[in-house]
Image: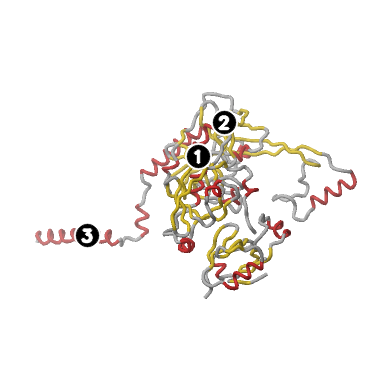
Amino acid sequence: MKRKIIFFSIALLVGLTIGVVLTVKLNLILPVHSQEVAAPSLDGFRMEDAIINVANTAGRAVVSISTEHTEKTKGGRRFYFSSPFGASPFGEEDSFHRFFEDFFGELPEREYKQRGLGSGVIIDSRGYILTNQHVIDEADKITVTLSDGRDFKGVIKGQDPRSDIAIIQINVSNLPVASLGDSDNLKIGQWVVAIGNPFAFAMQNPEPTVTAGVISALHRSLGRTLGRGRDYNDLIQTDAAINPGNSGGPLVNLKGEVVGINVAIFSTSGGYQGIGFAIPINNAKKIIAKLIEGKKITYGWFGVTVQDLTNELAKYFGSPDKNGALVVNVLESSPAQKAGIKESDIIKQLDNKAINNVRELLNAVGITEVGRKVKVMVLREKKDMTLEVEVGQRPENLEEISTTKPSYSKWRGLEVAELTPEIAQRLGIEEKKGVVVVDVEPDSPADEAGIIAPDVILEINKQAVKNISDYQKITKALKGDALVKLSRGYALIKEGE
């Protein structure tokens, strides 16, 4: 009898063991059970300690920067009927001032002060502070508040609007200094901490705010419209909360090293929505020494407008892949024109280094010493050729000298109009010849190609389009796919079915 009991006990134990193994292997445990046994890992505690350490070390080197700028305007402050978004859409403000001037004469000039707020990080014990250029732009007075509450007058040592980097200095020594890291080694998903002093005017507290998140993406671009002339083509994207007043503060890794300078948020409401951007610290390192010395920062320049390749464009031009930068325009008397670079060339290499996209080309040319001659390999008419370009200095008024060639008719879903001086002025178009797109039919070949109003058509299949007559003549006889050159780049309009 005892043997039978022992036998059944062993059989039951083996059965239970097999059941547990099968359950684990086949994932048969209900989700509610796995949630009940889940517990915070030790890694969580270590990360918490790391963030606390970052706040206590790098946080001490973060400062609040407040600025004042005095402007003169007739009648002093013009805020009586203005909306939160600027001048009133109903014109009450102008009506008020016209009424005032009719009865009391021309309004006198008065001064009023604009105030700004940002953050910065101490990078040298001698009082040098790294921040964004837009934080101190046009400032007449700069006040720096340390994390311990002390206030000091800030002096601009150097600033560079294009990179949006500036150095200011305060007259005090033995300051806590942040360590600069290496932004080239960042990885998507890596934990980071954003430090700054958002809404400091409301909080009345000099201690910086700490928010944690991950690196969401690398090499992000805000484009020319959002960038407003600044070079926001190689940014770090993070979901660590960045709010107004955080600009100029550091983005820090869990070692406490500064890997970026917080610069912008992408928001539909003006507040935090999980998408923030920072300038890689390695980009700032390249110019910090020059800014401290008060030197002007210069950038290399070819004098071309370029765009990234699509699969369709790569196939059309005979490129084996999408790597490279497609030349759209070549400016008159520019280094590129003098070297023989032509429109529709694809720049593949610069000094034997592969160029995969527009961002890489702009970065490579920008950091090249002005006056240096570089070898540029281009793909032209499906053949590789090497040209030598002497790098020029990027003009300060580049937006003014850049060429953009800006017509009724219907072709492949496009409706265009003749370009007149009035239309050009209204749309802000600099071109004197071409046709302007006024409408694109949904789901048409032109729509599929990404053409939108008010794009300006300059060429079709490398034939110049100077006016409506040229446009109609070319499109009437055209068969097959069409390569259309727009003022902003190339598009391939496929023949409709």
Task: Compare residues 149 and 427 and report the one nearer the observer.
Answer: 427
- What residue is disc 3 on? 16
Label 3 – label 2 distance at C-alpha: 65 Å
- Judging from the image, what secondary structure is the residue with disc 2 in? loop
Residue farthest to the right, as pictured: 103
Displayed quadrant of residue 107: top right
SS under mark 3: helix
Q: Judging from the image, what secondary structure is the residue with disc 1 in?
A: loop
Q: Is residue 217 left or right of residue 138?
A: left
Query: Which numbered circle lies on residue 415?
Result: none
In the rendered image, the vertical position of residue 395 relative to residue 409, given as above or below: above
Q: Is residue 400 visible?
A: yes
Left or right placement of residue 91 versus residue 102 in this view: left
Q: Earlier in the sequence, mark 3 or mark 1?
A: 3
Q: Percent from the top left, x then y, of residue 64?
A: 58, 35
User: Residue at 42% across / 47% down in the picture?
Assistant: 353
Specify the amino acid type for callout 3.
Answer: Leu
Label 1 belongs to which residue? 372
Nearest-to-viewer mark from 3 and 1: 1
- What's the coloring here? secondary structure
Q: On residue 146, which mark appears?
A: 2
Residue 434 pos. (x, y %) = 65, 62
Mark 2 or mark 1, which has the lower sequence index?
A: 2
Alpha carbon separation for disc pair 3 and 1:
77 Å
Q: Nearer the viewer, residue 231 or 385?
A: 385
